[in-house]
């Protein structure tokens, strides 16, 4: 483990609507306070806890040394998009399946002892900029740590999408949708759709169709320096663009979605010696 400056200004973010996350946040805040740390809470967490637990703060602008995220991968995804390459994030997994959250509930305080002493690694995870360019209307931009998904609604028929990479036509999909994923997101929806598992250190992007009509249309992997563009070709269908499963917008015929590597990276704290392969074995039930 690398040695880092001692951490004193700590942000806490709890999963919304989770009593367990709020109770653990209060407990962690008291533990940190006894060790001389200043504790700050994001607005939603502060609204659910007594004021003596911690000061409400705008986390991206609060000049923090560390942000502890208590919940699961979904909560960490939302905070990572918010923080960008600001303070490093330590994820505490209070759920069942977590590839991003670093420590479980039973490991929490031993890990915090190491982290506060500066004995941890920071792992940089590539993010993506997702630009929505409608044929009519205002463009929107998103940032993704996991993926961007174009998919039909449950009642819609199969949709048609054209795909290009760096401005060059690649193929036309007739499918239930399309997933464009970072290596970090390869173990999310991409995995369920039959895409490959990618090591998070790889500089690539995976493009995976969802239930394609033509079986020769398989997932493909391109350099993350490439710009991927999908255009919705089918009309009169209910289609959505969803980013990290949390932000979304409707798509209409002729709308374009452009995906490219972001200049911003997510900075995740690694306080254990657990490797990516050990995480896969544990989370996916591989091996004996």
Image: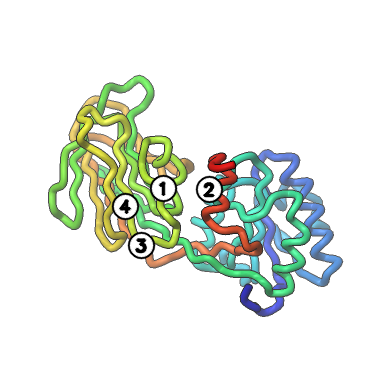
Distance between mark 4 and mark 1 Cα atoms: 25 Å
Q: Is mark 4 on a helix, strand or loop?
A: strand
Distance between mark 2 and mark 1 Cα atoms: 10 Å
Q: Which residue is drawn at 83% across and 69% down?
A: 35
Q: Pointer 4: residues within 10 angstroms few (<14), some, or many (20+)? A: some
Mark 4 or 1, which is nearer the eye?
1
- For marks 4 and 1 on the same chain, the one whose residue lies earlier in the sequence: 4
Q: Pointer 3: residues within 10 angstroms few (<14), some, or many (20+)? A: some
Q: Quadrant of residue 6?
A: bottom right
Q: Are marks 2 and 1 in contact (CB under 8 Å)?
A: yes
**Residue furthest toward the right?**
34
Q: Pointer 2: residues within 10 angstroms few (<14), some, or many (20+)? A: some
- For marks 2 and 3 on the same chain, the one whose residue lies earlier in the sequence: 3
**Residue furthest toward the left?**
169
| Residue that label 4 marks | 131
On screen, residue 166 above or below 218: below
Give the x, y percent position of residue 56.
70, 59
| Residue that label 1 marks | 197
| Residue that label 2 marks | 280
Q: Which residue is drawn at 65% across and 46% down?
A: 71
- For marks 4 and 2 on the same chain, the one whose residue lies earlier in the sequence: 4
Choose between 102 and 241: the one closer to the eye.
Answer: 102
Give the x, y percent position of residue 182.
39, 53
Q: Quick check: 60 left or right of 57? A: left
Q: Do the residues labelled 3 and 4 touch (CB within 8 Å)?
A: no
- For marks 3 and 4 on the same chain, the one whose residue lies earlier in the sequence: 4
Q: What element carries label 2?
A: helix
**Residue furthest toward the top?**
155
Q: Quick check: 268 left or right of 7? A: left
């Amino acid at each position: 483990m690398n040695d880092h400056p001692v951490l004193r200004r700590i942000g806490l973010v709890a999963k919304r609507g989770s009593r367990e996350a709020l109770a653990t946040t209060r407990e962690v805040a008291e533990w940190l306070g006894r060790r001389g740390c200043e504790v700050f809470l994001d607005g939603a967490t502060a609204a659910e806890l007594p004021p003596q637990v911690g000061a409400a703060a705008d986390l991206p602008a609060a000049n923090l040394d560390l942000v502890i995220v208590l919940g699961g991968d979904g909560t960490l995804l939302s905070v990572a998009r918010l923080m960008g390459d600001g303070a490093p994030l330590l994820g505490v997994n209070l759920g069942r399946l977590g590839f991003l959250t670093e420590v479980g509930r039973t490991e929490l305080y031993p890990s915090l002892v190491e982290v506060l002493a500066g004995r941890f690694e920071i792992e940089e995870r590539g993010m993506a900029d997702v630009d929505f360019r409608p044929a009519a209307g205002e463009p929107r931009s998103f940032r993704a740590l996991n993926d961007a998904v174009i998919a039909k609604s449950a009642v819609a028929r199969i949709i048609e999408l054209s795909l290009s990479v760096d401005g060059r036509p690649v193929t036309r999909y007739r499918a239930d949708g399309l997933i464009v994923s970072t290596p970090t997101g390869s173990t999310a929806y991409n995995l369920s759709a039959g895409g490959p598992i990618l090591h998070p250190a790889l500089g690539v992007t995976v493009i995976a169709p969802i239930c394609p009509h033509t079986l020769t249309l398989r997932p493909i992997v391109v350099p993350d320096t490439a710009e991927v563009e999908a255009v919705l070709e089918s009309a009169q269908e209910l289609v959505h663009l969803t980013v990290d499963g949390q932000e979304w917008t409707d798509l209409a015929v002729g709308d374009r979605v452009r995906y490219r590597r972001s200049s911003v990276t997510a900075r995740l704290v690694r306080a254990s010696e657990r490797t990516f392969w050990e995480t896969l074995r544990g989370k996916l039930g591989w091996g004996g």
